[in-house]
């Protein structure tokens, strides 16, 4: 298992990415807010963030023929209310078949190192209620600080 930095173009062209993205979409969708898997739209939005130096993407791969089994998309930038640079996990997913391999923790460590190098004071990570990540984060030194609530307006 290894983790490497990628561009979104690199990530989206990996063999197995469509299957991984489909599993991510099914697992991470919010009731009336399905994940929009239009890669051209996503690439355009991420492109602007990458151009600003705020977007950092990591992929987890299983050798020998590298197979993508997870990804973490991190945003790093100023958080005005704190007047500091902070990182936030925008999308974080490991295929269910690879969640006991350490892929998630390795992705977290890569994002933390990147955020530290960018001068971030900390990293914010969200996790689905009751999901595997909500159990992994506390064991990795993360503290529950806020809860995010959602209400559909559609």
Image: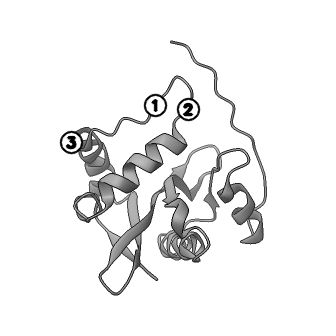
Where residue 75 sits in the image (x, y, percent)?
46, 55
The residue labelled by disc 1 is 34
The answer, for residue 52, to whether it is visible in the render is no
Q: Secondary structure at mark 2?
A: loop
Mark 3 burial class by Cα count in 10 Å: few <14, some 14-19, many 20+: few
Quick check: marks 1 and 3 in contact, CB under 8 Å?
A: no
Left or right of residue 37, residue 154 in this image: right
**Mark 2 and mark 1 residues within 8 Å of each other at the beta carbon:** yes
Q: Which mark is residue 30?
A: 2
| Residue that appears at 52% across and 22% down | 32
The residue positioned farthest toward the front in the image shown? 97
- Residue located 69% across and 31% down the image: 149
Q: Residues within 10 Å of mark 2 (few under 14, many from 20)?
A: some
Residue 40 on image: x %, y %: 21, 42
Residue in the picture at 56% in, 26% down: 31
Q: Secondary structure at mark 3?
A: helix
Real-space CA distance between mark 2 and mark 1, rounded to the nearest whole angstrom? 6 Å
Instruction: Out of 143 and 3, give the one closest to the viewer.
Output: 3
């Amino acid at each position: 298992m290894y983790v490497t930095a990628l561009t979104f173009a690199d990530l989206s062209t990996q063999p197995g990415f469509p299957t991984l993205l489909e599993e991510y979409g099914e697992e991470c969708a919010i009731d009336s807010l399905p994940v929009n898997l239009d890669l051209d739209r996503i690439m355009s939005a991420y492109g602007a963030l990458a151009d600003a130096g705020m977007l950092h993407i990591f992929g987890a791969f299983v050798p020998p023929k590298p197979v993508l089994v997870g990804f973490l998309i991190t945003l790093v930038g100023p958080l005005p209310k704190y007047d500091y640079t902070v990182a936030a996990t925008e999308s974080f997913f490991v295929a269910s078949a690879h969640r006991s391999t350490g892929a998630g923790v390795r992705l977290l460590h890569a994002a933390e190192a990147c955020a530290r190098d960018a001068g971030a004071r900390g990293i914010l990570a969200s996790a689905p209620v009751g999901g595997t990540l909500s159990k992994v984060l506390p064991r990795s030194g993360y503290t529950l600080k806020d809860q995010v609530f959602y209400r559909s307006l559609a």
